[in-house]
Image (tube, rainbow, N blue to C red):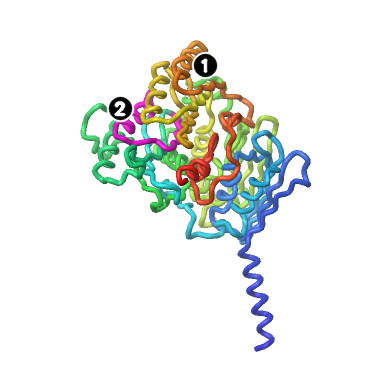
Amino acid sequence: MQLCAPLSDLFIQAKEYLASVRVCIDNSTCSDCTLVKVDSMNKNGILLEVVQVLSDLDLAISKAYITSDGGWFMDVFHVVDKQGQKVTDEKTIKHIEKALGPDSNLLGGAKGGSSPVGSVGMHSIGDHTAIELKGPDRTGLLSEVFAVLAELGCNVLAAEVWTHRARVACVVYVNDVASGQAVGDACRLSRIEHRLRLVLRGHTGGDGDGDDSPAHANFFSSGGAGSNTHVDRRLHQLMHADVDADDDDDGLDSHAIVSGEAGNVSAAEERPVVTVEHCEEKDYSVVNVKCRDRSKLLFDIVCTLTDMHYVVSHASVSSDGIYGIQELYIRRKDGRTLQKDEAGRVIKCLEAAISRRVSEGFTLELCGRDRVGLLSDVTRVLREHGLTVTRADVTTVGGQAINVFYVRDASGEPVDMKTIEGLRVQVGQTVMLNVKKVPSSPSSSSSAVAANAKTPRQPASGALSRTSFFSFGNLFAKLRA
């Protein structure tokens, strides 16, 4: 029995070693980037969680080598910050080590929000109600949504809005204007949902109870089930359902052609190239992606594959000039490779996921004292100037509204500078307004609005991750204070 004791201790040590996660932040190997190395036991969804942490810090991934075949997960990411420099900020480094290290939930399952069908919300960050909306997009829709919320006494704390191929998906976080608490009354929530469904349908009347409507509205209170789901991931899920519902593959081509005819030729030229092949030697399906490189590209691709129930076993990520190149070896969760009909669906969904974050036109950065109805007024002015909001990022920090709108001309023509100047005069009377042309450089195409923002480097523990401009960690840390 005495001989077995050391052997038992050895097994315990081996188990602890295998259950650990090792993170190394290496600033000495490469002169122009930081290497983030992650070694751990493998589990379903671990790659997405790692990439999500790096993306939420606005770190650009220039190269990556990923392998997770068998029971072990070993990844190396070459990253730089928003200024294209090495990651040297101690708070950022400590956040990466904490978020991915042994004390994180990287290998846990109880606290995570990785369910592909989970609801969206925020965990332990104050009283609020999360509202999911999706439906057909049109000029002025966002203005109508915010007007309804203001009329019904809802204060918007934060919001993220995406549009793609004439569809819109958004997640809005609100509380009651009078009490500052979450909207919990069932009758009131029913009235809000009824009004929002009418807005999404473009109706001014009707009962709004038809199940065949493309409009969708869901409500979730803080701390509810599935409340840890990442906001960008949830937006992908909401829009992914629309891709699944559209079986007309020609719609992708016709959309690109129409955009080009409307004077937006670059949209057609930059359409991602996605192929799926079968690797006989290793019995994998190989997904190849080449598109204009940008921030969060790897996150969008891995997020989509994960929610489609595919496992990325190996991958390499690199850049070729302005283009990002990714090669991913995937299988279904049951270990099988993709069937022929699956390959077409993967291509279609990846093209859509990559394109959703691509914006053209102008970004409008607005900062001013928050008040009920501010968003309704601002978006109404945008509509009156013939501008369509293609994406929006709304936050409120310490009584200050910090809003970013990606806008383009509703007709598809280039935005007239006279329109921008008129907008500046009208909106600038109540808030500070900064107008930027969306840059075409790959390093800043999806995060241009964050260039001049003093974005906190470290999201608060347990907060819902946020992308661009201001972090949710900073926002809700102040709301809790």
Query: Disc 1 and disc 2: Cα gap in Å?
Result: 28 Å
- From what the image shows, is residue 431 above or below residue 105? above
In terms of secondary structure, where does tag 2 sit? Answer: loop
> Which dot, 1 or 2, sits closer to the camera?
2
Q: Quadrant of residue 3?
A: bottom right
CA neighbours of label 1 inside 10 A, class few (<14), some (14 to 19), many (20+): few
**Residue ID for mark 2:** 202
Indicate yes or no whether the magenta region holds residue 468: no
In terms of secondary structure, where does tag 1 sit? Answer: loop
Place of residue 478 in the rendered image (x, y in percent of width and height, measured from the top left): 49, 42
Q: Quadrant of residue 98?
A: bottom right
Q: Is residue 282 visible?
A: no
- From what the image shows, is residue 276 above or below residue 226? above
Left or right of 143, for residue 473: right
Q: Are marks 1 and 2 in contact (CB under 8 Å)?
A: no
CA neighbours of label 2 inside 10 A, class few (<14), some (14 to 19), many (20+): some
Left or right of 463, for residue 185: left
Residue shown at 51% from the left, 57% from the top: 334
Residue shown at 36% from the left, 33% from the top: 135
Q: Amino acid at mark 1?
A: Gly
Q: Amino acid at mark 2?
A: Gly
Residue shown at 42% from the left, 17% from the top: 386
Place of residue 5 in the rendered image (x, y in percent of width and height, measured from the top left): 66, 83
Which quarter shows the N terminus? bottom right
Where does the magenta region start and end? 137-165
Indicate yes or no whether the magenta region holds residue 141: yes
- From what the image shows, is residue 457 above or below residue 44? above
Place of residue 68 in the rendered image (x, y in percent of width and height, measured from the top left): 63, 55
**Residue ID for mark 1:** 263
**Nearer to me, 334 or 461:** 461
**Nearer to me, 399 or 361:** 399
Left or right of 76, for residue 143: left
